[in-house]
Amino acid sequence: MTASPSKTRSATDGSPPRTPPSGVLERGLSILECFSEDRLKLQLRELAECTGLDKATLLRLLGVLVRARMVHRFDNGAYSPGPALLHLGMLYRRTFDVGSRLQPALQEVMRQTGETVAFYIRDGDERVCLYRENSHNEVRHHVEVGARIQLVAGGSSSHVLRAFTGGSTPQAQAIARDGFAITREERVPQIASVALPVFDGDGVFLGALVVIGIAPRQSAAAQRKAVEIARRALAAQGFAARPPRDWTGGA
């Protein structure tokens, strides 16, 4: 017997029962939101548990999404994000026109520090990696473009993003004083990072640039040097790593 939607639980996290969305568009979006980095392929049963939708409704919506290439269906019945989403993601990155200047800055910071460098923006309660340059070191922290991480999970870039978007962070005073945030093994064991804000030429906060490496390589001196390298690289591309004097949006 199929459970009623009101009694359906999340497919993987055991969260409280969720009420299925009512609008057609909301239902379609709820299907796409079920996929994540650790849930790339889902069966119909898992999608039903995740969305709270009955299987008949799911099959109708999935048919539309598959035809639109927003969802891909495998021969074994599993579903995954479709190629149309990649196309939309690339369009989004192109509209984020600072990318053509940010990428060279990240490359320069990676070249001088030898560590992985990434740029994150805030999206709701998550941070999303828009650009990255992975270290060439054999032992390194690897970051993928599009990776989404809950802000509450920690990491220096999450503190910077919260500080400059009206959120609360225990590092707010340190960020306001020093202009950067440092964490050691806060989210990932044996990993340390330092992050600083990025502002465009008009003083608008864009996101956080973070330098990430193995903790033993990330001494306080190395992290402060990375901050100076990042500030110079950003300035060379027309960005600022400190808020304007009349900044009122956060830290």
Image (cartoon, grey):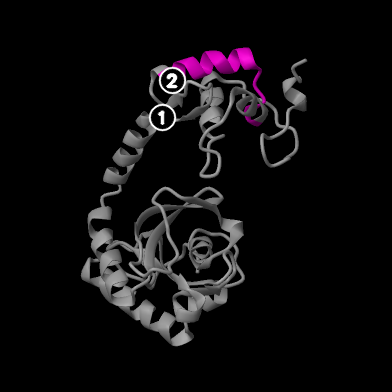
Q: Secondary structure at mark 1?
A: loop
* Stretch in magenta: 50-66
Mark 2 packing: few (<14 Cα in 10 Å), some, or many (20+)? some
Instruction: Pick whichever of labels 1 and 2 is earlier in the sequence.
Output: 2
Disc 1 target residue: 82
Q: Which mark is residue 66?
A: 2
Q: Position of residue 136 (x, y in %)?
A: 33, 67
Magenta-span inclusion, residue 51: yes
Which residue is depicted at the point 54% across and 65% down?
Answer: 155
Q: Secondary structure at mark 2?
A: helix
Which residue is depicted at the point 27% across and 54% down?
Answer: 99
Magenta-span inclusion, residue 139: no
Q: Is residue 214 above or below residue 21?
A: below
- Which of the 4 image quadrants contains residue 197? bottom left
Observer-nearest residue: 62 or 241? 62
Q: Amino acid at mark 1?
A: Gly
Observer-nearest residue: 193 or 23? 193
- Which of the 4 image quadrants contains residue 168? bottom right
Q: Is residue 84 above or below residue 190?
A: above
Q: Is residue 93 above or below residue 212?
A: above
Q: Position of residue 131 (x, y in %)?
A: 34, 55
